[in-house]
Amino acid sequence: MNAEQKRIRIAAVLVLVGLLVEGLTLHWSHPTAFFVYAGLGGLLLLFGVLLFLSTLLGGATSHPASPDPAATTKPTSSDDEKSST
């Protein structure tokens, strides 16, 4: 398992725990239930979503499969003339 998969799993756990906390506080009939719902559950959800999105957006630049820029060659003028005929 690589680092991206670990980060996505951690994000999924954060989101699931946040949803669990919010689900439990819906059945809790105490005034502090709202603070736990919005504070703890909301923050867990927020951190999970942000970690997931940062993993997806940041992972695209860290792949070593990108081509080597030194290996690419630019076409010369004679190559352009051959392709245009």
Image (spheres, grey):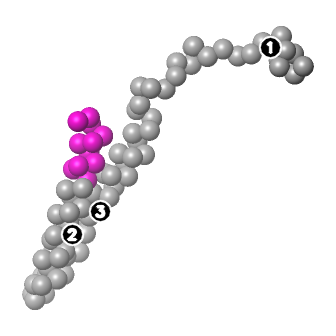
- Compared with 35, 50 (above or below) is above
Disc 3 marks a residue whose amino acid type is: Leu
Whole-angstrom CA distance, mark 2 to mark 3, is: 11 Å
Whole-angstrom CA distance, mark 1 to mark 3, is: 54 Å
Quickly name the residue at label 2. 19
Left or right relative to 37: residue 79: right
Which residue ends up furthest to the front in the rendered image? 85
Q: Secondary structure at mark 2?
A: helix
Foreground mark, 2 or 3?
Answer: 2
Q: Secondary structure at mark 1?
A: helix
Q: Earlier in the sequence, mark 2 or mark 3?
A: 2
Residue 53 location (% of width, % of height)? 37, 52
Left or right relative to 7: residue 58: right
Quickly name the residue at label 1. 79
Q: Earlier in the sequence, mark 1 or mark 3?
A: 3
Quickly name the residue at label 3. 46
Region in magenta: 1-11
